[in-house]
Amino acid sequence: MAATTTPGAVRAAAPAGPGPRPRNRRAAGLRPWLYLLPTGAVLVPLFGYPIYMLGLLSVFDYRQAQVSGGEPARFVGFGNYAALLGDERFWSVLGQTVAFAAALVVSTLAVGAALAVVLTRAGRVPRLLLSVAAMAAWAAPAMTGSTVWMFLFDTDLGLVNQVLGIEGHNWFYDRWSAFGVVGLTVVWHSFPFVMITLYAGIQAIPGSVLEAAALDGASAWHSFWRIIVPMLRPLITIVVIQSIIWDFKIFTQIYVMTNGGGVAGQNSVLNVYAYQTAFGSSEYGLGSAIGVVMTLILLAVTLFYIRALHRSGEDL
């Protein structure tokens, strides 16, 4: 007689498949966070405590009397923020900061992109010299660079006045010329990052794509705008957002080159305004409120920056 098998025996004899392993999956999910623990242990106290103290001071009436211990700090809640938002000076400085940062971002992107294209067409030696010069500008401290540019535009001994044949012209007296000189300094510090980033992106474009466009009759200008720029759009987005973060919180160049914000504060930006409010007027609570507002604005830009990184496929 033929042997018969029951369904239960078939199920018992079937090999066991790789079933779910919840513990292993949970461990795999926790592993990235474990890798971040050493960095978090350093960065959280380093940045978390100052931000906490900044937010704490912003809700108190904290002046020189409170610093010296003559009077206790008085809790005012959102009083500093209300005073700040109702101050016309704050809105004027905020608008000036946004406009100046926008001009810097556009100028930096234009100079960096143009020099990136030059790098792709230059010979080996000119490319090396341009790269070294750009890296030197990028590596120079902001204080040193500002001092050098101030000397170039000095009223009496400045090279610029001598070349242009202008005697005794003060470039830092007028608001717009002062912003122009400071803008040149900031762009000089910032363009190497844009140049190197975009140059690396251009080098990553397959040469066959550009050769095919040339065979189809596309000029260098059309190839740049129709092929190179669309393929570099993720990199351009990242560079622009990074430049916004840098230029929005500019302080050293403005404070040093315009002697604390120019005549009657005409060249003030938010960072300088916060510094003068906190340490010049001894209104530390109000100055902290300005710092919190700036932090929130930059946080929003940073979140947009991280989103752009994800869209470009970069790992964080």
Image (tube, grey):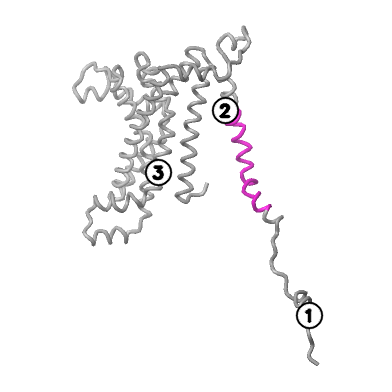
Q: Secondary structure at mark 3?
A: helix
SS of the residue under disc 1? loop
Tell me if 312 is positioned left or right of 215 in this view.
right
Are circles 3 and 1 on residues that touch, CB within 8 Å? no
Furthest toward the left, the residue is 165
Quickly name the residue at label 1: 6
Q: Which residue does the numbered mark 3 point to in the structure image?
A: 237
Residue 199 appears at what percent x and percent y? 36, 48
Q: Position of residue 30 (x, y in %)?
A: 66, 49
Q: Is residue 38 magenta?
A: yes
The residue that appears at 50% across and 30% down in the rendered structure is 296
Q: Is residue 235 above or below residue 57?
A: below
Task: Residue 136: name its quadrant.
Answer: top left
Q: What whole-number distance in Å separates the C-alpha atoms at marks 3 and 1?
A: 66 Å
| Mark 3–mark 2 distance (CA, rounded to whole Å) | 28 Å
What amino acid is at disc 3? Thr
Front disc: 1 or 2 = 1
Magenta-colored segment: predominant secondary structure: helix
Name the spot of residue 211 as percent of width and height, x first: 28, 60
Amino acid type, callout 2: Ile
- Density class for disc 2 (Cα within 10 Å; few <14, some 14-19, many ≥20) is some
| Start-end of magenta stretch | 26-51
Residue at 49%, 42% in the rendered image? 306
Residue sitting farthest toward the bottom: 1
Label 3: few (<14), some (14–19) or many (≥20) C-alpha neighbours in 10 Å: some
Q: How many marks?
A: 3
Q: Residues within 10 Å of mark 1 (few under 14, many from 20)?
A: few
Label disc, if present, on residue 51 of the rendered structure? 2
